[in-house]
Image (cartoon, rainbow, N blue to C red):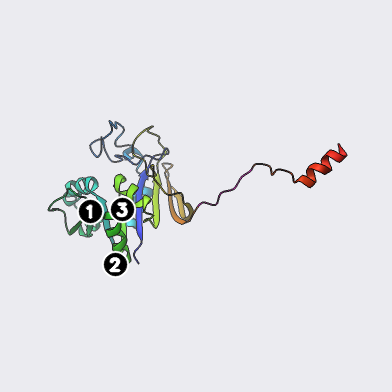
Amino acid sequence: MRKLVVNAFLTLDGVMQSPGGPQEDPSGDFHQGGWIVNLFDDAVGETMGEIMGQPFDLLLGRRTYEIFASHWPNVRDDPGADALNAAHKYVASTTLRNPAWGPATVFGGDAPARIAELKRGDGPEIQVHGSSNLIQTLLRHDLVDEFRLMVFPVVVGAGKRLFGDGTLPRRFEVASTRISPSGTFIVTYQPTGEIEIGSFALAEPSEEEQQRRLATA
């Protein structure tokens, strides 16, 4: 069984859209692209180096695949680029034809079933980067085993969020935490099951207790 891990850059208000520059994803009239650039410190870089320093395959949505394909093959002398370029890319898309950035496999049609089948096989962990629309599908089908989140000290007010409508309610445990000099919270969460509901409301007194109070009033 392979582990599926979502790696995400987030704002404090939960937005993951277009962290690296305005051109990445301006959809929805988003004007805050590039919000991590001036906060990306050495500790965040070290964390990304650790993530990229282990064997992995990539699972991407079409848009993120195309953004990565236009960038990473042109990057030189970067171990992260080497790892991304060498990884097998699985792309969830019904429109992508003849993917040029390989090795690559396109999942058309029933992507959740294909991804579940992929997880049941052998191989390295499956990493998701970016791909906000794909992540919503993964969340609805409970396919994510771990979240590695880097939460930057900035709010943008609107944009695509990691946990959108349709996310299944889940509770999590913390596997690791770290705070970078820029104030970025680096945390790994693992889902542990359904939410256990409780209440801080005072319990209603029993009938016996009500009678006792009346008798002593």
Query: What residue span does the magenta drawing correspond to?
Result: 195-200
Give the numbered dot on residue 90: none
Residue 55 visible to an observer of this rendering: no
Q: Position of residue 47 (x, y in %)?
A: 36, 53
Distance (Cα) linking label 3 and label 1: 19 Å
Residue assigned mark 1: 109
Q: Kindly identify the amino acid type of the residue bearing the numbered disc 1.
A: Gly
- Residue closest to the eye, 59 or 150: 59
- Residue closest to the eye, 129 or 91: 91
* Discs 2, 1 touching: Cβ within 8 Å: no
Identified at 18% across, 58% down, the residue is: 104
Q: Residues within 10 Å of mark 3 (few under 14, many from 20)?
A: many
Q: Kindly identify the amino acid type of the residue bearing the numbered disc 2.
A: Gly
The count of marks equals 3
**Which badge, 3 or 1, comes first in the chain's sequence?**
1
Overall secondary structure of the magenta section: loop
Give the numbered dot on residue 128: 3
Q: Is residue 199 magenta?
A: yes
Distance (Cα) linking label 2 and label 3: 15 Å
Residue 217 visible to an observer of this rendering: yes
Residue assigned mark 2: 123
Element at badge 1? loop
Side (left or right) of 88 relative to 168: left
Q: Nearer the viewer, mark 2 or mark 1?
A: 1
**Which badge, 2 or 3, comes first in the chain's sequence?**
2
